Image: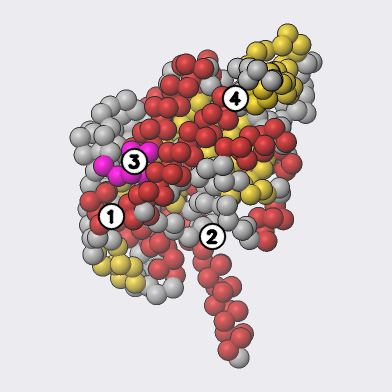
Amino acid sequence: MEVIAPETSRDGWQRRIAYSYACRCKNGSPVPTTLTRWVPQAGINGYGHDPKDSPRHPRVLITGALGQLGQGLAKVMRERYGRDNVIMSDIKKPPPHVLQSGRFLFADVLDLRGLRELVVNYEIDCLVHFSALLSAIGEQNIPLAMQVNIEGVHNVQEVAKQFGLKLFIPSTIGAFGPDSPRNPTPDVTIQRPRTIYGVSKVHAELMGEYYHHRFGLDFRSLRYPGVISADTMPGGGTTDYAQMIFHDALTTKQHDCYLRPDTRLPMMFIDDVLRATVDFLETGSDKLSMRTYNVTAMSFTPEEIAAEVKKYVPDLEVTYQPDHRQAIADQWPEVFDDCNARQDWGWTHRYDLPTMCETMMNALVPQYNQSNNAVDAIEK
């Protein structure tokens, strides 16, 4: 149970007193104990302050921060809110460059008590929940996927409700199924996915919207398409061929694609994904007509991206050997309709297929050249 005290700070923050019933008196009745902290009220950028008038920035906790999106989002948010106001967390040991970039904490999303302690001890205002098993990996370990993708969501939603946090949980094209319209796929339509990853994402969307309408939780979600990045290696998703083809082109010049050449899927470059996420979080609730939005930038097939990559590596050879991921891709949208995101909060993409490929090559070629030079030096 929570109540809002009448005191309000000069920068638009209010004091919230959260009552805990962990203690009990001799007759077994609960005795409330209080924990006082300041929480943001709705304001210009969604966090209760105008950055022109106040240096106060939101304190953000990112779970699953060592994945494809977490490191990039932490970098963008630290540039906006300050290094000490964005905390990365995961259950894995971070590499040295992550530790040097800012605060990193161990956080297991299955540990509800531990999450509560982090939120209180570090005065968290916004929780970004990236912890999840992706589509192909989830199908190989369904019990673990149910734990991480469903129980973990329950925990972060409960913590966000208890402490009045803004909560962002990404969704995916995998939240749609074979009964969904595929070209285009609107925000609101039949979903009914047939992977545990997709089912868990629909569950997160509906639970988040329920918590919003029932408890006033500021829940937000974006349905991401396939994400392409030069900063991380593929992590087991069905759309990861679109990232791996660049690495193969610059190493073996041979790419074995696990999808049919005509399999069309929506995609986004990582910079667009991160910008969309931060802009969405900073949008005032009064501008949102829904809590879960599609976002996208382009749609292409394996043969279309292969043709574009061959402009840089003409002798690239591509073969097609569809595996179990083909059945997953056949259930997903071909083209995302994200008109509501563009209309409600001004979303617009900057990268199409040619500009994305050019950016990927500009980023990866120096990395591989440096690596090859290092190998040559060692051999000499």
Q: Earlier in the sequence, mark 3 or mark 2?
A: 3
Residue sitting at the far top: 6
Q: Considering the image in quadrants, where does the N terminus appear?
A: top right
| Number of the label disc, if any, that sits on residue 68 | none
Residue sitting at the far front: 27
- Circle 4 sits in a helix, a strand or a loop, which is it? helix
- Circle 2 sits in a helix, a strand or a loop, which is it? helix
For residue 24, what is the image quadrant?
top right
Say which amino acid is labelled 4: Gln
Whether residue 346 is visible: no
Whether residue 256 is visible: yes
Q: Earlier in the sequence, mark 4 or mark 3?
A: 4
**Residue 228, position in %: x, y?**
44, 51
Q: Earlier in the sequence, mark 4 or mark 2?
A: 4
Q: Nearer the viewer, residue 288 or 64?
A: 64
**Majority SS type along the magenta span:** helix
Q: Residue at the spot x=58%, y=79% of the render? A: 373
Q: Earlier in the sequence, mark 3 or mark 1?
A: 3
Q: According to the image, label 4 marks what residue?
A: 162
Say which amino acid is labelled 1: Arg
Q: Nearer the viewer, residue 327 or 132?
A: 132
Q: Residue at the spot x=65%, y=26% of the render? A: 22
> 136 left or right of 74?
left
**Residue 186, position in %: x, y?**
31, 29
**Residue 306, position in %: x, y?**
32, 60
Give the magenta range.
194-200
